[in-house]
Amino acid sequence: MRYSLVLIYILFFNQMFSQDVQQVEVLKNDKQVTELFDEIGNSEIKLDVIDLLSQPALNIGYEKINDSYSSYGADIFLNFNDNNASRSWSEKFSLNPFYRFYFLNKTDFGGEGYFAEVFIKFSNIEYERDTYFYNPMPNEPYSTTEEIKAWDIAPGVGVGRKWVNKKGWTFEYMLGFGRYLFAKSGNDNPDSDYEVDNYRPEATFKGGISIGKRF
């Protein structure tokens, strides 16, 4: 559901901004870029509105603009959902450092336009694991369910677009995917008398729609 909302909002806002973009004179030298950085700032705080509106979760980020075409930063995701359903998986907390490369800039506000991003997620996750026994004893259950808590790391890549106005307010969307390094499913010992089902995906999603402010 969250991923569908992100795609719908991205298509809507991309169309809206494409039809109503103010033409701004392109900056041509380093002095002008430096003056603009001094005016609106080269640091940015932002909030993901999709996580805030679609679920009880908070995603806040910080970005430092290196120059017109690169930046680095990190965002923190806090999930306040109480998910106890069977076959459930939940990312409860993640710290996500990233590095961005901006390109195809139509205006030179520094860190604006289309971008590609490389990131790594350090995630605390909770999920359920079912164990099925082939030949249980009469007084033993046929299956058991465990709540598992673990840490994992997921490198990934993403793409997106950002707009910046002259007062330093920013709007961006981003979509990215990563793969967990330690994720595994199934039974570690296929010759044993039980089977294990892990409802923990091997991939992770990163993205959303954010509003921010330069300072």
Image: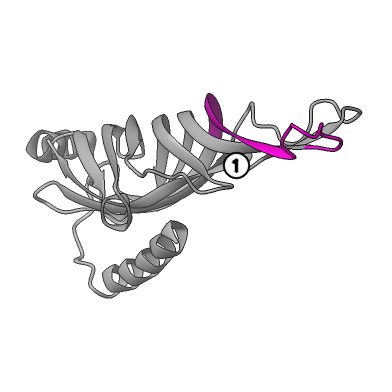
On screen, 209 above or below 58?
below
Residue in the image at 23% along x and 42% along y: 46
Q: Where is residue 202, by image quadrant?
A: top right
170 lies left or right of 68: left
Residue 51, position as x, y percentages in the image: 32, 50
Residue 118, position as x, y percentages in the image: 49, 35
Residue in the image at 32% along x and 41% along y: 80
- Look at the image and say whether residue 151 sits in the magenta stretch: yes
Q: Amino acid at mark 1?
A: Ala
Q: Nearer the viewer, residue 24 or 90?
A: 90
If the image is split into quadrants, where does the N terminus sit? bottom left
Residue 44, position as x, y percentages in the image: 20, 37
Residue 16, position as x, y percentages in the image: 28, 73
Q: Residues within 10 Å of mark 1 (few under 14, many from 20)?
A: some
> Which residue is labeled 1 in the image?
203
93 lies left or right of 190: left
On screen, 55 above or below 150?
below
Residue in the image at 75% along x and 32% along y: 139
Q: Nearer the viewer, residue 39 or 202?
A: 202
Instruction: Provide the residue span drawn in magenta.
Output: 133-155
Whether residue 207 is visible: yes
132 lies left or right of 115: right
Whether residue 120 is visible: no
Q: Nearer the viewer, residue 168 or 196?
A: 196
Disc 1 on helix, strand or loop? strand
199 lies left or right of 122: right
Q: Where is residue 206, by image quadrant?
A: top left
- Look at the image and say whether residue 138 sits in the magenta stretch: yes
Q: Where is residue 50, by image quadrant?
A: bottom left
